[in-house]
Image (tube, rainbow, N blue to C red):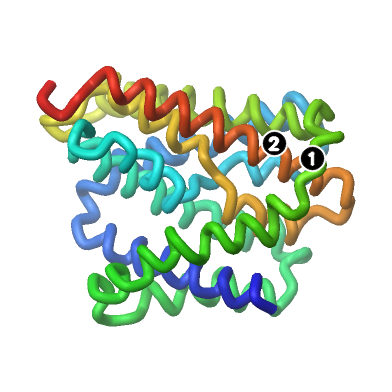
Amino acid sequence: MLSEVLTFIFFLLIGLEIREGLQKPKDAILPAISALGGMIFPALIFLLLIPGSQAWAVAMPTDVALAIGALSILGKRVNPAVRLFLLTLAVADDFFSLVVIGIFFSEDLHLASAIYTLGAATIGFLLPLRHKLISILSPFATFVIIPVYIFINLLTKLDFSVATEKVSVAVVIARVIGKVFGITLFTFLCIRFTKLRLPQALHLKEVVGVGFLAGMGLTVSIVIAEITLESRSELAQVRMGLFFAAIASGLIGVLWLRRFPASQ
């Protein structure tokens, strides 16, 4: 029950952030397209490594709170444009992930699951006073919901004996490599062949760092895994893969962006 309540509040926050991020739709186009690249390539890499597995969808979502939390380690050293691009991309990523759940896994999506995921996000999208609600719920999500949810659904269920199993390894490879490759490639193609441009203060090399941080995905990915996977063994492997991918992606992303302080 606690897990469902926390999930509802978390997806409510996602809906609020999606709506808040859409106040300037034109500015969100490039990060949204980049997010698609960061979803497509991890999923393709996973399916190439594990053909036929329903776990492919867990390689796609970006955990907004974790990614922004990792970025905050850099403090004032980080370019503000990096944070904005990452937040917009992560919100778009989570929105597309919700769409994927509805389209590809509607038969596996029980009514209760739909209510505390898609339903919560829809409510958040429609609520007024979004900025105030986000300012209240965001710290709560970062310091309460995310840690408790991870503890309940991940840390207490980690099985290190499956750390080297094929699904665990595939999740790590798909997220750590696929995310940064897809995001960077789609961003480059957009600015090279369309009229879309990065913000003046943002450089493609910093987008690479965003791509690494986007490889952090626990909360939404775990929800997708629990909805779609029946095999306990495969679910255990997914958890291990997400755990190691989040650590690797966060560490590489922070170290990469340290090379490009805000003054540059």
Q: Is residue 151 above or below residue 173?
A: below
Query: What is the distance, in whole Å, between disc 1 and disc 2 at their CAs?
Result: 6 Å
Given contact means CB atoms under 8 Å apart, are the residues at marks 1 and 2 in contact? yes
* Residue 186 appears in the figure: no
Question: Which of the 4 quarters of the picture holds residue 126?
Answer: bottom left
Amino acid type, mark 2 = Gly
Left or right of residue 137, residue 5 in this image:
right
For the C terminus, the image quarter is: top left
Question: Which of the 4 quarters of the picture holds residue 263?
Answer: top left
Q: Is residue 121 above or below residue 52?
A: below
Where does the image place residue 211, in percent across and percent down from the top left?
A: 42, 30
Q: Which residue is mark 2?
A: 241
Which SS class for mark 1?
helix
Where does the image place residue 13, in percent across and percent down from the top left?
A: 41, 68
- The residue at the point 45 percent across, 24 percent down is 252
Using a 10 Å C-alpha cutoff, classify the residue at mark 2 as few (fewer than 14 neighbours), some (14 to 19) or many (20 or more): many
In the foreground, 255 or 54: 255
Where does the image place residue 112, in percent across and percent down from the top left?
A: 69, 78
* Residue 252 appears in the figure: yes
Which SS class for mark 2?
helix
Using a 10 Å C-alpha cutoff, classify the residue at mark 1 as few (fewer than 14 neighbours), some (14 to 19) or many (20 or more): many
Amino acid type, mark 1 = Gln
Circle number at residue 237: 1
Number of marks drawn: 2
